């Protein structure tokens, strides 16, 4: 597969979808390497069977111990996805919104969607383990209509991201980002909003989730994408049968023994069931069918009152315990690190 080595100008007569080479704008805050020289394995995939085993012991009465709270320096805009690369680097995808989208109202749909494009920038921000900012890159051009950088995945070599219009049923660009330079490479264009992507490194398939994670589209990388900005079409669009939460950020786990070696990802998310009821949860999800094979509600909220599973999520086993990393709040964010108490009491419930 031949790929452009840098972002390309994706303009049809008037629409700028994404960006140009010049739009990669990096502000460096600390003169240190962005990522470890030897890129480590992704935590989730390296600990697949162990994570699945720990997940199988979680329940509604699991005690979640807050083991670390890291304040992230500077404006984090709307954090969307996070990957931890080694013990001292967090990469955060975030969306900066310079003018809001506006709903057409009265159920009006124009060109398949229900609101204006708004405007903004897709960011990738790098922090050290203490939340000190190392670099902030914008990956999109001013006036580009795709600027929403969703849930991300790291495969040991690249960070994968979908930069989309910030409205349902619109368009998105799948790209990979080199964690050592933050240089993005455009892979393909999709005629739908995509709010996150997961890379199955064993099959080399990419699962992209659309608005509210209602549908999953799989790109088998053995299939050549259409030349950008033409849209690649996909034979399979799988409806997500679970309405328990909308997944926000997912990581590839692997092909766990316990699930007959099926392609599995770990996802977190939220659902607003009414103006006053929001629920959060984490799930192990079959990447081919979107069927959740295990799911657990998460009820913790941030100090500012947001469900912790609202946006970025990362996972690892540390010291024999299952750890989740959540960053729910916008602009002035705190990373909440929770560990599942292995000896949590079991209760039958009401
Ligand atoms: C690059 O980003 C910085 C910080 O966000 C901003 O001040 C500057 O105007 C940007 N430069 C360009 C050429 O967009
Ligand atoms: C709808 O799509 C057409 C064709 O691309 C375009 O000319 C028109 O401006 C779009 N309308 C809106 C409101 O975006
Ligand atoms: C998405 O938009 C297309 C037109 O652009 C329309 O045909 C299709 O029905 C829309 N799909 C949904 C789920 O709204
Ligand atoms: C999901 O995909 C199905 C086809 O498999 C399509 O009919 C439906 O409109 C899609 N829904 C959304 C919300 O994209
Ligand atoms: C950000 O939040 C911290 C607490 O987490 C608070 O001390 C600080 O004043 C806040 N900064 C801004 C600019 O709101």
Image (cartoon, rainbow, N blue to C red):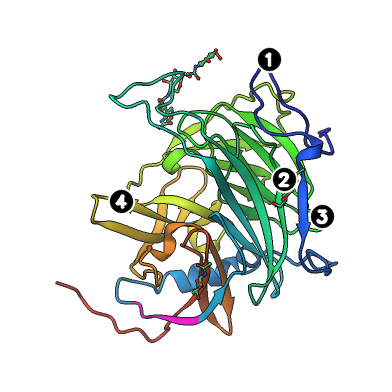
Distance from Cα at disc 2 to Cα at disc 3: 12 Å
- Which residues lie in the magenta part? 62-67
Q: Is residue 75 left or right of residue 113?
A: right
Position above or below: 293 against 322:
above
Q: Which of 334 and 90 is in front in this view?
A: 334
First in sequence, mark 2 or 1: give its number: 1
- Determine the secondary structure under disc 1: loop
- Determine the secondary structure under disc 4: strand
Q: Nearer the viewer, residue 219 or 159?
A: 159
- Determine the secondary structure under disc 3: loop
Residue 176's tag is 2
Q: Which of pointers 2 and 1 indicates the residue nearer the eye? A: 1
Distance from Cα at disc 1 to Cα at disc 3: 31 Å
- At 30% from the left and 76% from the top, the residue drawn is 61
Distance from Cα at disc 2 to Cα at disc 4: 31 Å
Most common SS among magenta residues: strand
Residue 181's tag is 3
Please provide percent x and percent y for residue 103: 38, 31
**Whether residue 254 can be seen here:** no
First in sequence, mark 4 or 1: give its number: 1
Quickly name the residue at label 4: 272
Q: Which of pointers 2 and 3 indicates the residue nearer the eye? A: 3
Q: Does the magenta stretch include residue 66?
A: yes
Quickly name the residue at label 1: 13
Distance from Cα at disc 4 to Cα at disc 1: 39 Å
Q: What is the residue that sits farthest to the left in this orientation?
A: 350
Q: Which of pointers 4 and 1 indicates the residue nearer the eye? A: 1
- At 70% from the left and 44% from the top, the residue drawn is 139
Residue 225's tag is none
Q: How crowded is mark 4: few (under 14 residues within 10 Å), some or many (20 or more)?
A: few
Q: Which of pointers 1 and 3 indicates the residue nearer the eye? A: 1
């Amino acid at each position: 597969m031949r790929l452009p080595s840098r972002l390309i100008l994706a303009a049809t007569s008037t629409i700028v979808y994404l960006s140009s080479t010049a739009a990669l704008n990096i502000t460096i805050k600390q003169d240190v390497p962005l990522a470890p020289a030897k890129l480590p394995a992704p935590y989730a995939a390296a600990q697949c069977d162990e994570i699945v085993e720990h997940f199988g012991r979680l329940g509604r009465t699991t005690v979640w111990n807050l083991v670390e709270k890291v304040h992230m320096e500077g404006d984090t805009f709307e954090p969307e996805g996070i990957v931890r690369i080694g013990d001292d680097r967090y990469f955060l995808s975030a969306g900066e919104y310079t003018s809001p989208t506006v709903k057409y109202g009265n159920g009006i749909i124009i060109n398949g969607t229900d609101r204006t494009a708004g405007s903004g920038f897709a960011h990738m921000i790098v922090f050290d383990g203490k939340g000190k900012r190392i670099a902030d890159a914008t990956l999109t051009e001013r006036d580009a209509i795709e600027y929403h950088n969703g849930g991300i995945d790291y495969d040991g070599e690249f960070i994968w991201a979908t930069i989309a219009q910030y409205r349902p049923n619109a368009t998105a660009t799948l790209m990979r980002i080199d964690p050592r330079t933050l240089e993005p490479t455009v892979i393909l264009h999709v005629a739908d909003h995509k709010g996150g992507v997961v890379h199955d490194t064993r099959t080399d398939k990419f699962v992209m989730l659309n608005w509210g994670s209602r549908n999953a589209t799989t790109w088998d990388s053995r299939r050549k994408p259409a030349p950008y900005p033409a849209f690649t079409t996909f034979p399979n669009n799988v409806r997500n049968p679970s309405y328990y939460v909308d997944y926000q950020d997912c990581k590839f786990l692997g092909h766990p023994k316990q699930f007959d070696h099926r392609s599995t990802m770990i996802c977190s998310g939220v659902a607003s069931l009414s103006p006053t009821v929001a629920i959060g949860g984490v799930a192990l999800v079959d990447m081919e069918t979107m069927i959740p094979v295990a799911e657990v509600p998460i009820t913790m909220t941030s100090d500012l009152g947001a469900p912790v599973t609202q946006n970025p999520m990362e996972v690892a086993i540390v010291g024999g315990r299952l750890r989740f990393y959540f960053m729910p709040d916008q602009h002035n964010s705190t990373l909440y690190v929770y560990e599942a108490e292995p000896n949590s009491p079991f209760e039958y419930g009401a």
